[in-house]
Image: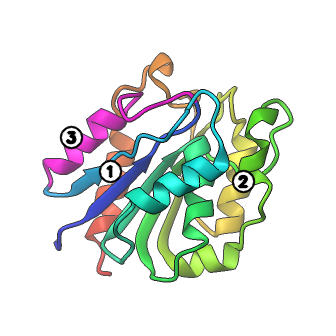
Amino acid sequence: MQAKTIYIIHGYQASPQSHWFPWLKQALEQEGATVHVPELPGPNSPKVQGWLEHLQVNIQQHDKHTFFVGHSLGCITLLQHLMSQTTPIGGMVLVSGFAEHLSFLPEVDPFTASPLDFEHLIKLSRHRVVVAAKDDNIVPYPYSLRLSDRLGAEWELFEEGGHFMEQDGFTEFPAIYDVLMRIMSEPA
């Protein structure tokens, strides 16, 4: 398997050290992958332009050997970033993602203000997987399901898992590791 590069994009009020990100980074590095977890600026009061500029500077690779994992607000941020790309990527896994206004979280409205070209995103990424939990009380799973439908993505719904954060018991996330290993092993 050719060397893979993975970028993990954290969400609101998180960092590269949050939740299951360090565990996933280490597990993938043990498989020979290069893994980056950019530290997005101001995670407690995120600004879409600042986050997108940070990704533009810190994501050095976009090709069929590059895979992305987004969590929560990191999903829409990643999708907005990919809108400016033209080289196909290997795939993306979006965890507890959304791409529409969240009435209960108005501070993240700027992230969904620009519409996504789902046709472009589908052409850009051969593998698209969206993961959510029925008991997510931060981003209710129907938001993730609609995102999955619009992306034509594989859909995985957990009975339990909350928002897949450390406080939900997620300091490791073997299911995401397994999905990544599967899609990375398929021929480009």
Q: Looking at the image, which residue is at 56% across and 48% down?
A: 51
Q: Which residue is mark 3?
A: 26
Residue 99 lies, in percent from the top left, at 72, 53
Q: Nearer the viewer, residue 101 or 126?
A: 101
Q: Looking at the image, which residue is at 35% across and 77% down?
A: 64
Q: Nearer the viewer, residue 175 or 109?
A: 109
Q: Which badge, 3 or 1, is on the more N-terminal residue?
A: 3
Q: Which residue is mark 1?
A: 178
Residue 153 lies, in percent from the top left, at 58, 65
Identify which amino acid the numbered label 1 is placed on: Asp
Residue 174 lies, in percent from the top left, at 33, 39
Do tag 3 and tag 1 residues touch (Cβ < 8 Å)? Answer: no
Q: What's drawn in magenta, residue-wise?
A: 13-31
Q: Looking at the image, which residue is at 40% across and 48% down?
A: 8
In the rendered image, which quarter contains the N terminus?
A: bottom left
Q: Residues within 10 Å of mark 3 (few under 14, many from 20)?
A: some
Identify which amino acid the numbered label 2 is placed on: Ala
Q: Nearer the viewer, residue 153 or 70?
A: 70
> Any magenta on residue 19?
yes
Q: Which residue is mark 2?
A: 99
